[in-house]
Image (tube, helix red, strand yellow):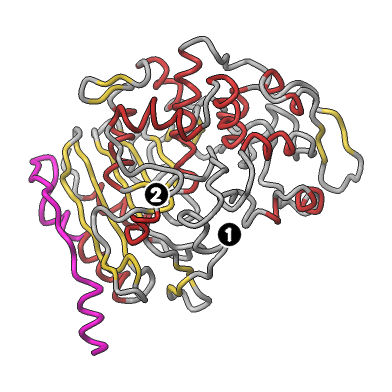
Amino acid sequence: MKLLILALSASLCYSQAVPDPAFDTARLARIDRLLERYVDQNKIAGAVALVLHDGKPVYERAVGWADKEGGSRMTVNTVFRIASQTKAITSAAVLTLVEEGKIGLQDPVGNYIPTFAKTQVALPGDSALVPAKRAITIKDLLTHTAGISYGTDKHVADLYRAKGLGPAAGNGWYTADKDEPVCETMERLGTLPFVAQPGEAYVYGYNTDILGCVVEKASGMPLDEFIRTRITVPLGLKDTRFYLPAAESGRLAAVYASGPDGLAVRAPEGPKGQGNYIEGPRKSFSGGAGLTSTARDYARFLEMIRNGGALNGVRILAPRTVELMVTNQSGTLHSNTGLGFGLGFQTVDRYGASGMAGVGAFGWGGAYGTNYQVDRQSGTVIVLMIQLMPNATDISSKFSTLVYQSLMK
């Protein structure tokens, strides 16, 4: 019986990917063996891998289990919690309003959320709070240079916990169980001290959740409705939502965690595990970490970005706006190793800074192990979906390498 289960777990579900002369078919098959090995060794429960070239699928596989204990196999239509991959979609939503003149990149955030009009900074090792040197802007939030963390830093953690944020919100970024709209949470956040002065450091945190509230304030509609009407429905993204309908609960992959021995074990219920993406208040639309999606849906969104803001005759953003998103806008604040950060994406500014990704590539990932990269030089979109938190594997970097080693152009 054990051998039978192992054989089933390693079997692959193939899609209608088409041969492409730009890719060596035999080399692409090496990805099959990589995915099989990680499932067979129980480093991951399962995965969906998708590669587009010039908008067409050249590789798509589902391997292993969506829910190992429940006996549900992984399929190409399995739904994943994409956590911080939500940030790119929210950033695109913000920029549609920038294009309409309803938001300005240099606008102070306090114009939309009053508690951000005058913010404070708590410096490590100093109990005193100092006023921010200047107002936090929309661009600061898009580039993660506002000085705003997830509130888990030791010197501010207790303050954030008392306000239901930071350590009180799972790993800091989790809000799916909150019984309040996201703007109420963000208004409370504005009363807390941040950890760096605006524009002086790259600090990863609640920035895009704040932007989600800004979208609500500037558009006059909830974030989920705005994203649905302006991005997902126009692009035909049927499976990209903040919460799944109860009737589709069987489509959501279970979350696993890398144990001390590196083997995947089922994660517990609650904010640091399975989350409240089906059963829950359904009131908090986290622009920074709240969406669920499929590999196909997310790749379609990325293809729109790669294509300069339009897909199949549907334009979401102008080409120049997209260029702002995928060009480093933060200098060396994000990194001095050849990686930058644009208006929603990490950028590759030097070949070798991110594996074999070409200069001009962009990407990011999510806390549950999902990962993507768009390489504009080669015209490829690479998406890997797993549900592993914490993730002690190197499957994302190896998957990326095996995609590039199969590319012959």
Q: Neighbour class for label 2 at 10 Å: few (<14), some, many (≥20)?
A: many
Residue 329 placement (x, y as % from top left): 53, 24
Marks 2 and 1, Cα distance to the nearest angstrom?
21 Å
Q: Is residue 399 above or below residue 210?
A: below
Q: In this view, does 216 lie above or below 288?
A: above
Q: Name the residue under label 2.
A: 371
Q: Residue at x 21, y 57 (%)?
A: 61
Q: What stretch is highlighted in magenta?
A: 1-30
Residue 194 placement (x, y as % from top left): 75, 38
Q: What residue type is labelled 1?
A: Pro
Q: Can you tell which mark lies on residue 271? A: 1
Q: Residue at x 40, y 52 (%)?
A: 370
* In the displayed structure image, the side of residue 366 where residue 70 appears, left or right: left
Q: Neighbour class for label 1 at 10 Å: few (<14), some, many (≥20)?
A: some
Residue sticking out furthest to the top: 101
Residue 340 placement (x, y as % from top left): 50, 33
Q: Reply yes or no: does residue 23 show up in magenta.
A: yes
* Residue in front for this viewpoint, 290 or 281: 281
Q: Which amino acid does label 2 sit on?
A: Asn
Q: Reply yes or no: does residue 270 show up in magenta.
A: no
Residue sticking out furthest to the bottom: 1
